[in-house]
Image (cartoon, grey):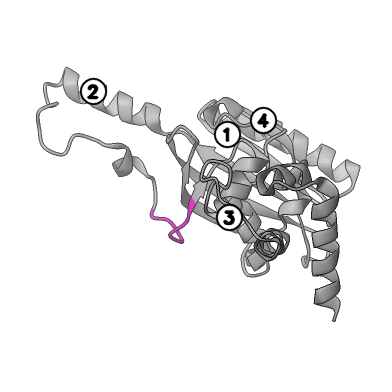
Amino acid sequence: MDANRIKQIRSLIEFLSRILGDHYEIVFHVINEDKTYIDTIINGHISGRTEDSPLTKFALELIESKVYLERHYVTHYKTVTKDNKRLQGSTFFIMDEDNQAIEGMLCFNLDYSGRVDLANAILKDLNLSLLPGELQTESLEAQPAEDDFTEILSESVKDTIKQFIGVDLQTDNLTLTQEARLDIVKVLEEKNIFQLKGAVTEVADLLGVSEPTIYRYRTKIQKEKMN
């Protein structure tokens, strides 16, 4: 994505943030062949993320599955922050001029917890708080989800990697063979993890090997793909 287009999208995000207000987190992801990163984030306090945070496992899987070739957006899916706050997420895909390659994503995460608190406060003022069916967070999800997705918002590359691996190698004190480490790197390569800033360092730390070893694994995997 060229610099002028990025600048235009930043202006659009500023405009949308003024309309939508403080309850929406807006995240602009730039997606290049060799690097994927957050360019802009508004109201990051909602999820605790910053511009240094990585793409989520969910976002990487959207890219890998090429959902963007079938539809322009995904809306009203469940999103969970690291501290278990429930949000409602929607993602718009930014495509190239030929509408074939993805160049970015605009992600919107709605924090509707304030609506729940307000609704329950009104119920209490009306002496209705003891009635069955007091409003819960789930009842204020505006529309049914298009798909049964749940996105876990990662604050660090390490969190995203652990979601793909499925276990905490350091906490669980697992000893891995070279073949097992290679298999893990292969999975992470397929999921585009290494497009994330700092991914090589984090993977090397998790697997207990050096960064050059990770690069050697990746080279071997790429050569196998070509054969």
Q: Badge 1: few (under 14), some or many (20 or more) residues near its Cα, within 10 Å?
A: many
Which residue is found at the position 71% from the left and 47% from the top?
A: 203
For label 3, the residue is 165
Whole-angstrom CA distance, mark 2 to mark 4, is: 35 Å
Q: Badge 3: few (under 14), some or many (20 or more) residues near its Cα, within 10 Å?
A: few
Res 15 quadrant in image: top right
* Residue 50: image tag: 4
| Label 3 vs 2, first from the N-terminus | 2
Q: In this rendering, is residue 205 above or below 59?
A: above
Which residue is found at the position 57% from the left and 25% from the top?
A: 45
Q: Quadrant of the C terminus?
A: bottom right
> Can you give x and y, in whole percent of width and height, for residue 170 in the image?
58, 42
Q: Badge 4: few (under 14), some or many (20 or more) residues near its Cα, within 10 Å?
A: some
Q: Badge 2: few (under 14), some or many (20 or more) residues near its Cα, within 10 Å?
A: few
Image side of residue 56 versus residue 52, left or right: left
Q: Specify the amino acid type for callout 3.
A: Ile
Q: Specify the amino acid type for callout 4.
A: Thr
Q: Is residue 34 visible?
A: no
| Label 2 vs 4, first from the N-terminus | 4
Whole-angstrom CA distance, mark 3 to mark 4, is: 23 Å
Q: In this rendering, is residue 196 above or below 98?
A: above
Q: Specify the amino acid type for callout 1.
A: Glu
For label 1, the residue is 25
For label 2, the residue is 122
Q: Main secondary structure of the magenta part?
A: loop
Which residue is found at the position 77% from the left and 51% from the top?
A: 195
Tell me which segment is drawn in magenta.
144-150
| Label 3 vs 1, first from the N-terminus | 1
Whole-angstrom CA distance, mark 3 to mark 1, is: 28 Å
Q: Is residue 148 visible?
A: yes
Question: Does the CB distance between marks 3 and 1 fall below 8 Å?
Answer: no
